[in-house]
Amino acid sequence: MTKLSLSTLASASAKVLKPAYDPASVEIGIVHFGPGAFHRAHQAFYFDALLATDSRWGICAVSLKSPGVRDALGPQDGLYVLAQLDAETTFRVIGSIRETLVAPENPEAVFARLAAPATRVVSLTVTEKGYCLGGDGKLDLANTDIAHDLTDPRRPDSVIGYIVEGLRRRREAGLAPFTVISCDNLADNGHKLRDAVVAFAGKLDTGLADWIAAQTAFPRTMVDSITPATDDALRARVTAETGFDDAWPIQREAFVQWVVEDTLPKDGPDLASVGVTLTNDVAAFEGAKLRLLNGAHSTLAYVGLSRGYETVGDAMADAQLAGFVRDMMLEDIAPSLSTPPGLDIPTYVEAILGRFRNPEIRHLLAQIAWDGSKKLPFRILETAAEAVAADRPLNRLAVPIAAWIAFIAARAKAGTPPVDPLADKLMGLGAACTGGPEDVDAFLKLEAVFPPSLASDAGFSTAVKAAYATLVQA
Ligand code: CS2
């Protein structure tokens, strides 16, 4: 079997799509933090397409913690296979990642890239928790990584610390700032990131903070493509179909979407030419996707796991659960949305449900259940808060919240902590659960998750308690 690399690329079987450019001759114009599966399935795919016409947009992929990506992709010259799963699956070698760095091993190499004149864009997929925000959506100065980075800004742990030091060096060198593109599922991701970066910089140097606030664009984005984690079945299939031994192939559904606020620099990457939607109304797209798709996903995850299902497909095969999720989307979430131009919500909802049923995809509910304390606020709680304000019913929206509490309680009882930045705290709360309404009261006190105004709303807590009682009995 052939190890995938630049020198073996030409031997790929004819059905494998290959980069339409010479990966060895591209320039690095993008620094990306968090090169996990989603980045490699999504942004790296778009930049791979763009490189066919503009060689300035190779990616330097920076891992903030683990060397896993560098160790896998380094020996294969950054190449990997992307499987796009549909009735007909396509296999494509992605060549846009031209360098892989592990930040803690060599922060200076990261700073050198950030401060290089050719670097015009810094993008991020660091998940919700990577932004180090508190329950109020602002930079959490008590976060351990942030507290560390403020005392040792030349050896940061957080992505915020890297961005600020990178911008500081550019300012010092008389260079324009880079554009910072958040690609995580956070409501209002660009503004939240800008505010966090400016707040951090302000603690070190107010002149720098002012310069960043005045000169740096942080476009808001919506990203979408269902990307199940790599599993052995994918590895075997990639080997069989492509003939390559690839240390870390990636899979996703064929559907892919990227909506970016139209504030990219004029001579920056021409994302529109590769199918990215540039608009001044990202909020509408983002709200629809985050609340409908991700809200439904988290609901399927927590309710589905409590019913013993393993994958999104299994949960969708439960007609009662699939019907519940559709009703929730159409009746409870849709009224909270400002509709993006040209988007028909019922059609969008059916398309999402169809994607969840894609028989080619095995998407583990356990993967979606990760980091619930950071995901639920954007996916469900903002919708619930708006429902409270507008006096709309809460009974269905309360179900994913109750199911999350029941999920944490079950994990605590089993002694298996959830993957969640609040895991310790959640294990304590879960262990104390008795199955009664006081469990809900205890969880609603978590200010990092539930805004006090929502937690103290009697209608909201009553609805969550009613949903919890039903789940616990079931
Ligand atoms: C999922 C998302 O893991 C999760 O929490 O809801 O990753 C989802 O698959 C993507 O946002 C789809 O674009």
Image (cartoon, helix red, strand yellow):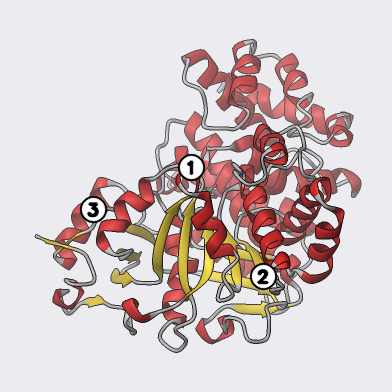
Residue 169 or 73: which is nearer the viewer? 169
Question: Hey, which residue is sitting farthest left in the picture?
Answer: 1
Q: Amino acid at mark 1?
A: Lys
Q: Position of residue 103 (x, y in %)?
A: 50, 49
Q: Which residue is mark 1?
A: 65
Residue visible at 28% across and 78% down in the picture: 18
Question: Hey, which residue is sitting farthest front in the picture?
Answer: 173
User: SS at mark 2?
Assistant: strand
Residue visible at 77% across and 44% down in the picture: 139
Query: How dense is the environment of label 3, judged by Cα within 10 Å: few (below 14), some, or many (20 and up)?
Result: some
Residue visible at 67% across and 62% down in the picture: 169
Q: Which residue is mark 2?
A: 179
Q: Which residue is mark 3?
A: 235
User: Does residue 253 appear in the picture of this structure?
Assistant: no
Q: Are marks 1 and 2 in contact (CB under 8 Å)?
A: no
Distance CA(mark 2)–CA(mark 3)? 35 Å
The quadrant in which the C terminus is found is top right
